[in-house]
Image (cartoon, rainbow, N blue to C red):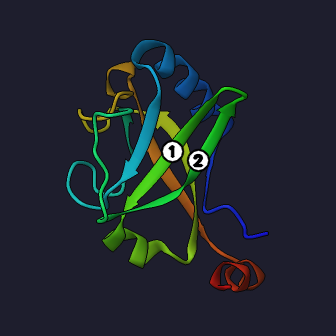
Amino acid sequence: MAPERVAVTPAAAELLVKLRGMHGDLMFHQSGGCCDGSSPMCYPIGDFITSEADVHLGDLQITDDFTVPVWISRTQYAVWAHTHLTIDVVPGRGAGFSVEAPEGVRFLIRSRVFRPEEQAELDR
């Protein structure tokens, strides 16, 4: 079984539960462009439209009935394809487009390079 490409910390998962209560179901998009550069942006489902220019990294299982899809721009994916990404949350204000911004926190990406055996499995 291939390793997961994306994960979430307990603190970020807890915040996502709170944000879901305020905004409904959510999604992440990682652009690698403007608006905090490498910060993942969290949107209510339907507020950000993905296309063939994006790659679906996976779904974060937050609770039994709550999953959050994670998308990344295809160009950013080409750069980060060899890394495992973890969505975390830290104090501070991020971009105004992401739903956590008014909460005084921001989501961020922590990454690590896939181990050789993980990369081999992903390359299959």
In what element is the residue under mark 2?
Answer: strand
Q: Is residue 37 left or right of residue 63?
A: left
Q: Quadrant of residue 85?
A: bottom right
> Which residue is situated farthest in the left direction here?
34
Name which residue lies at 28% across and 56% down. Answer: 37
- Residue, x 28% and y 41% (percent of image)? 48
Locate residue 18, reporting x and y percent: 53, 17
Which of the numbered marks, if any, corresponds to residue 69? 1
**Left or right: 45 as drawn, with respect to 33:** right
Residue 111 lies, with reference to residue 49, above or below; the image says below
Residue for point 68% across, 85% down: 124
Q: Earlier along the polypeptide chain: callout 2 or callout 1? A: 2
Callout 1: 10 Å neighbours few (<14), some, many (20+)?
A: some
Q: Nearer the viewer, residue 43 or 34?
A: 43
Residue located beneath label 2 in the image: 59
Residue 74 location, quadrant: bottom left
Determine the image quadrant of residue 5. bottom right
**Amino acid type indicated by mark 2:** Asp
Asked whether the beta carbons under mark 2 and mark 1 sit within 8 Å of each other, the answer is yes
Expressed as whole percent of the image width and height from the top left, the position of residue 47 reads 28, 34
Q: What kind of element bears circle 1? A: strand
Q: Position of residue 97 (x, y in %)?
A: 24, 35
Q: Is residue 40 visible?
A: no
Front residue (pair 110, 64): 64
Bin the neighbour count of mark 2 within 10 Å (Cα to Cα): few under 14, some 14-19, many 20 and up: some
Quadrant occupied by the N terminus = bottom right
User: Of the residues shown, which amino acid type is indicated by label 1?
Assistant: Pro
Q: Position of residue 104 (x, y in %)?
A: 38, 24
* Res 32 seen here: yes
Q: Is residue 71 above or below residue 63?
A: below
Give the residue displayed 29% in from the left and 57% down from the top.
51
Checking the image for residue 1, the label placed there is none
